[in-house]
């Protein structure tokens, strides 16, 4: 008597990898959440504004002018987006170059955050350019004496490096072991390149303002501003990783079942590093005021705002980092990290918007369309991060590919 064999249907790639094991109606129902509803409204309004901007130009959507050519899309989307993405090279170098393997569990989320941050910064730059198709001119015009030439090349190269680093978990997700093995062996070399390119362009962004001694307020202008930009990028990287890792491991904690990660211990370690770097950054900022003979401006309104930046969002967080790390108070360290992120955002907005053209009679105020586009880009970044983390091995390695660290 012949026995029949039972054929078990293999789950499709689309259902398992894209729909998270659900059928299409179930997956669509899972998207009906309050957060998704808010995000949908933001994107539904923001994308048409971008279309209007590219169709009708900057004049129809922004408050930019000949005296204020840089606005929110440069000060927030570009300058802030890039500096908050500094966690990629900060944590990557700690793990791959300095051998701090304990921080490997937060390396992949940091690299993903950096990759998405750079992509969104480039999109924000495209929106700000009057002729966005001319962005290639900064790369191929061979203006080697231009700071923008260096920024353009370094951003392009570093974004490529981040893409290659991201392909490691991407290939794990696809199950492509051969390509995964090749990219895994190049991680140290890619990390070295990331440090080189980040060092060059983070400082070069500050060098842009060396050309504006009469336009940038004396409290923010200094011949050492390119050094300040680089050190503050390290601060931003540490603070952003503290915030991002805490949120990610709380929201996506179900993915870590069976994978023990002591996030609190890692957070305290980042707190110690943050205290040192931020304390040094605070005194360097004071040194900039001394060298610029700008003490008198501290008694003005701009001086009060400058003190809010460096005392409230640099000195205070550095002390909180030190206190939290010394007393093993993770909550205090996370509060300091959030304050540090806000402080870096404030610094970039101050330098590129508030303190720029400070002596002009007419001040730039972003239009509601500029603000909405910026919110839209941030929302798209959060949505992309969530989509990827829910599907790919970002918070932990695929055990089929793990080789130990």
Image: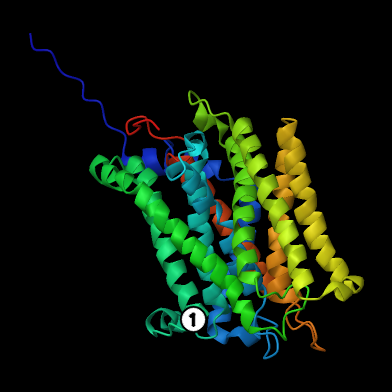
Q: Quadrant of residue 81?
A: bottom right
Could you tell me which secondary element the residue under label 1 belongs to? Answer: helix
Q: Nearer the viewer, residue 29 or 59?
A: 59
Q: Nearer the viewer, residue 240 or 378?
A: 240
Quarter of the image that includes the C terminus: top left
Q: Quadrant of residue 322?
A: top right
Q: Quadrant of residue 44?
A: bottom right
Image side of residue 66 versus residue 157, left or right: right
Image side of residue 318 versus residue 91, left or right: right
Query: Which residue is the extreme one toward the left?
Result: 1
Q: Which residue is under mark 1?
A: 132
| Number of marks in the rendered image | 1
Callout 1: 10 Å neighbours few (<14), some, many (20+)? few
Q: Residue at x 43, y 44 (%)?
A: 96
Query: Which residue is the extreme one toward the right?
Result: 299
Applied colour scheme: rainbow
Residue 377 position, x and y percent, is 58, 63
Residue 302 position, x and y percent, is 85, 73
Residue 293 position, x and y percent, is 81, 76
């Amino acid at each position: 008597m012949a026995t029949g064999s039972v054929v078990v249907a293999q789950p499709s790639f689309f259902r398992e990898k894209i729909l998270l094991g659900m059928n299409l109606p179930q997956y669509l129902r899972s998207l009906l959440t309050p957060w998704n509803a808010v995000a949908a409204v933001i994107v539904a309004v923001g994308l048409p504004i971008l279309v209007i901007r590219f169709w009708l130009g900057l004049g129809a959507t922004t408050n930019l002018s000949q005296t204020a050519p840089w606005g929110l899309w440069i000060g927030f989307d570009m300058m802030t987006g890039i500096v908050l993405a500094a966690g990629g090279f900060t944590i990557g170098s700690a793990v791959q170059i300095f051998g701090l393997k304990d921080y490997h569990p937060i390396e992949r989320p940091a690299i993903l955050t950096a990759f998405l941050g750079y992509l969104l910064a480039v999109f924000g730059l495209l929106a700000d350019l009057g002729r966005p198709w001319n962005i290639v001119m900064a790369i191929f015009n061979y203006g080697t004496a231009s700071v923008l030439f260096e920024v353009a090349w370094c951003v392009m190269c570093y974004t490529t490096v981040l893409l290659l680093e991201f392909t490691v978990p991407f290939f794990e997700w696809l199950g492509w072991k051969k390509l995964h093995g090749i990219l895994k062996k190049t991680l140290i070399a890619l990390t070295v390149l990331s440090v080189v390119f980040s060092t060059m362009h983070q400082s070069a962004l500050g060098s842009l303002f060396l050309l504006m001694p009469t336009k940038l307020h004396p409290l923010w202008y200094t011949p050492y501003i390119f050094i300040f930009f680089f050190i503050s990028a390290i601060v931003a990287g540490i603070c952003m990783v503290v915030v991002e890792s805490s949120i990610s491991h709380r929201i996506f904690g179900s993915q870590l079942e069976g994978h023990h990660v002591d996030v609190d211990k890692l957070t305290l370690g980042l707190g110690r590093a943050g205290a040192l770097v931020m304390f040094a950054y605070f005194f360097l900022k004071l040194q900039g005021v001394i060298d610029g003979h700008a003490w008198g401006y501290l008694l003005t309104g701009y001086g009060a705002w400058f003190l809010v930046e460096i005392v409230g969002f640099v000195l205070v967080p550095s002390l909180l980092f030190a206190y939290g790390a010394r007393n093993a108070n993770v909550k205090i360290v996370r509060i300091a990290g959030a304050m540090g992120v806000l402080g870096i955002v404030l610094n970039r907005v101050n330098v590129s918007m508030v303190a720029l053209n400070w002596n002009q009679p007419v001040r730039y105020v972003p239009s509601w369309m500029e603000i909405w586009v910026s919110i839209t880009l941030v929302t798209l970044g959060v949505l992309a991060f969530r989509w990827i983390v829910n599907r790919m091995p970002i918070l932990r390695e695929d055990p089929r590919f793990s080789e130990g660290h």
